[in-house]
């Protein structure tokens, strides 16, 4: 059975931030931040309506904020169930990105499709970058282990030196205390 | 952090997705018949939810009466759910507010209708018992 939407809440702080980036907030945020927020919004949404920016200094009532939060949870449920239909049509058990995109069209949120595709591209690039970075790290680590084995005998000598150094430092500290 | 997708850069670049993926996943999995969710689908759903929040907020503000006072109110949202086809799916969770007196009246009406139905059922039971 699906849980009641009230039990599946999204964090208020994040919801508030997202709303405020859409409907410019008053005080507390510098003009630069607001300007950047607007730029980001336009980049993310690519909506013609966004170009007619809302005036600054708009507030959101607590009630409205929590209502939007609930609406967001319901949206997730609706989108998931819709996406799931597409997955089942394709005889798949795992929801994938294209299912979500199809769901948006089905739900009449075509306006989201382009920004979502862009986000997907960015995400895939980032994942690729991460993978390459970790593979590089692994290569470096392997190289290091090889050279470490060669230096092992040299290291044992160094360890003795380090212990002596530490003792000297301790002696210094004791002197300072006195 | 496994949740954050593209953490904030040192220069403060917007992260790709702000909502916590773990929470989004919990909501998605609560949907019946959903077995597993690809990571990309999860990220896109989170992103879509953010877009939705922004859209709902700006739409409601522009079409609402809170505009005069530069505030987005609950009734702006309830109006949107009622009037806009796109947001119809929200009517149940964003009901319009009514006066308590009106609500009590409605409850009384419903109770009366229920009682009438029960009476009718009782009569038909009698008939069945006899035959």
Image (cartoon, helix red, strand yellow):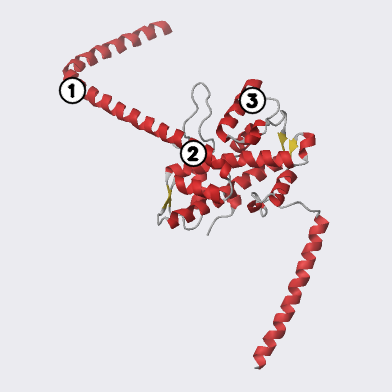
* In the rendered image, residues at marks 1 and 2 fall on the same chain: yes
Mark 3, secondary structure of its residue: helix
Q: Position of residue A140 (x, y in %)?
A: 27, 24
Q: Position of residue A117 (x, y in %)?
A: 49, 39
Give the residue drawn at x 67%, y 38%.
B58
Q: Nearer the viewer, residue B48 or A61?
A: B48
User: As displayed, is residue A43 above or below residue B111?
Assistant: above
- What residue does disc 3 label? A34
Q: Chain of mark 3?
A: A
> Label 1 neighbourhood size at 10 Å, few (<14), some (14-19), many (20+)?
few
The image quadrant where one finds the C terminus of chain A is: top left
Q: Nearer the viewer, residue B52 or B12?
A: B52
Q: CA distance from mark 1 to mark 2?
A: 48 Å
Whichever of callouts 3 and 2 sits on the residue coming sooner in the sequence is 3
Q: Is residue B63 in view? A: yes
Q: Chain of mark 2?
A: A
Q: Chain of mark 1?
A: A
Which-is-in-front pick, marks 1 and 2?
2
- What residue does disc 2 label? A117
Q: Is residue B3 in view? A: no
User: As displayed, is residue A158 above or below residue A91?
Assistant: above
> Label 2 neighbourhood size at 10 Å, few (<14), some (14-19), many (20+)?
some
Whichever of callouts 1 and 2 sits on the residue coming sooner in the sequence is 2
List the single residue furthest toward the front. A48
> Label 3 neighbourhood size at 10 Å, few (<14), some (14-19), many (20+)?
some
User: As displayed, is residue A54 above or below residue B90?
Assistant: above
Mark 2, secondary structure of its residue: helix
Q: CA distance from mark 1 to mark 3?
A: 55 Å
Q: Position of residue B121 (x, y in %)?
A: 70, 81
Which-is-in-front pick, marks 3 and 2?
2
């Amino acid at each position: 059975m699906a849980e009641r939407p009230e039990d599946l809440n999204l964090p208020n702080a994040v919801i508030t931030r997202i709303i405020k980036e859409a409907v410019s907030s008053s005080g507390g945020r510098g003009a630069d931040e607001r300007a950047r927020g607007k730029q980001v919004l336009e980049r993310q949404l690519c909506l013609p309506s966004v170009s007619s920016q809302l005036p600054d200094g708009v507030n959101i009532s607590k009630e409205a904020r929590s209502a939007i939060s609930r609406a967001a949870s319901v949206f997730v449920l609706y989108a998931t169930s819709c996406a799931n239909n597409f997955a089942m049509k394709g005889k798949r058990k795992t929801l994938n990105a294209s299912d979500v995109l199809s769901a948006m069209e089905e739900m009449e949120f075509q306006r989201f499709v382009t920004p979502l595709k862009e986000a997907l591209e960015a995400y895939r690039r980032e994942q690729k970058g991460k993978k390459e970075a970790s593979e590089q790290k692994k290569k470096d680590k392997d190289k290091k282990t090889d050279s470490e084995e060669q230096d092992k005998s040299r290291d044992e000598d160094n360890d003795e030196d380090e212990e002596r150094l530490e003792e000297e430092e301790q002696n210094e500290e004791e002197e300072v205390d006195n | 952090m496994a949740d954050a997708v593209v953490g904030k850069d040192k220069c403060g670049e917007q992260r790709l997705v702000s909502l916590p993926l773990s929470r989004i996943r919990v909501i998605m999995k609560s949907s019946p018949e959903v077995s597993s969710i690809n990571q990309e689908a999860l990220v896109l759903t989170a992103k879509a939810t953010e877009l939705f929040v922004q859209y709902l907020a700006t739409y409601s503000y522009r079409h609402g009466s809170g505009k005069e006072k530069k505030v987005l109110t609950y009734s702006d949202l309830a109006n949107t759910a009622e009037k806009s086809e796109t947001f119809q799916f929200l009517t149940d969770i964003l009901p319009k507010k009514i006066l308590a007196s009106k609500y009590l009246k409605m409850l009384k009406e419903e109770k009366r209708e229920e009682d009438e139905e029960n009476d009718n059922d009782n009569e038909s039971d009698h008939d069945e018992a006899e035959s």
